[in-house]
Amino acid sequence: MKSGELKLLLTSSPFLKQEEDTPYIMRQVIIALLPATLAALYFFGINAFLVILVSILGAMFTEWLFTRSKGVNTLHDGSAALTGLLLALVLPPGIPLWMAFLGGVVSIGIGKMIFGGLGSNIFNPALVGRAFLQAAFPVAMTTWSPVIPMNQFFHLYHTTLGIPFLKMPTAVTTATPLARMKFDAQLTAFHDLFLGSTAGSLGETSSLLILLGGIYMVLKKVINWRIPLAIFISMYVFAGILHWINPGHYAPPTFHLFAGGIMLGAIFMATDPVTSPVTQKGCWVFGIGIGFLVILIRTFGGLPEGVMYAILLMNAFTPLINRVTRERVYGTE
């Protein structure tokens, strides 16, 4: 190479913006999540507050534990707190608090730190924690406590204070909109899905509030709008084809867009800058893949919901998507 020529180091993802941008991005995402978080408190009372609190504590404790030996403090960047909050929002409102804490530990310990910390992880850490809880405690993760009146804000579900390794107390549970559709062929009213008065995870509250948070992040330029848009288009097209083939058997596409955790997943999980593609073409491919997998799993899989698995699967393909879709500079080797 001739003297004075510029050397460029090309590596595969994950990628992250400059370090000084990280606290700003984390703060903006947390701000965008505030409406959905407040909605969770409104619908599920003190139970939501406690699940969110212990999930964040588990994540931050594990971050501190991994970094203390290195003499550095990464808690100030807000990534651990955000991971704990995101994890809490994809958990059932009546999950035992010790499980929520354990989920926070796994999210940071296995989902992030074993890969080398923020910027090196392959999978979305919050979804890694949820996937672990889903595999380890399937009953607790599929027990959906009903919405409680606001005047009973301090009412605790029987399962919230469950003791580790002891049989969970019998809980009052109700079906989610996706479960009702899959197993009973019953559609939930659109206004309930849009405003959030349905059973489900803490973040499966108001689609309206989650969309407002997404618009805020797009305006602040902290997420790539192509990813959620590609997810929604892909889901609408695939679900629409199935509904057109057999409208009596397959749910309409609008139901899929507003039911379950797709709004939270598409806007706040799939757009994670570390685990999503960096190219514009790659973002479209990534989002289309997630949308297709969500409908595939919801419709033909054994579980009513498939957002978590769809995002984690596409996370695994992110390095390949980056390599295939990166711009070529012609005239160079």
Image (spheres, helix red, strand yellow):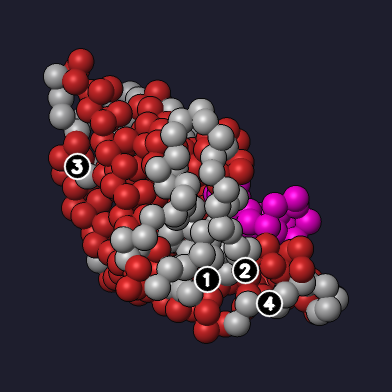
257 relative to 150 in the view: left or right: right
Please state which amino acid type lies under the numbered disc 3: Asp
Q: Secondary structure at mark 2?
A: helix
Label 3: how many Cα within 10 Å (few below 14, some 14–19, many 20+): some
Q: Are marks 2 and 1 in contact (CB under 8 Å)?
A: yes
Residue behind mark 3? 77
User: Residue pushed farthest top?
Assistant: 69
Q: Give the mark nearer the N terminus: 3 vs 4.
A: 3
Residue in the image at 56% along x and 58% along y: 172
Q: CA distance from mark 1 to mark 4?
A: 12 Å
Please state which amino acid type lies under the numbered disc 4: Leu
Residue behind mark 4? 187
Q: Are marks 3 and 4 in contact (CB under 8 Å)?
A: no
Q: CA distance from mark 3 to mark 4?
A: 42 Å
Residue 169 drawn above or below residue 108 = below
Which quadrant is home to the N terminus?
Answer: top left
Q: Position of residue 270 (x, y in %)?
A: 47, 53
Query: Where is residue 99, by image quadrant?
Result: top left
Residue 121 drawn above or below residue 179 = above
Q: Give the mark nearer the N terminus: 3 vs 2.
A: 3
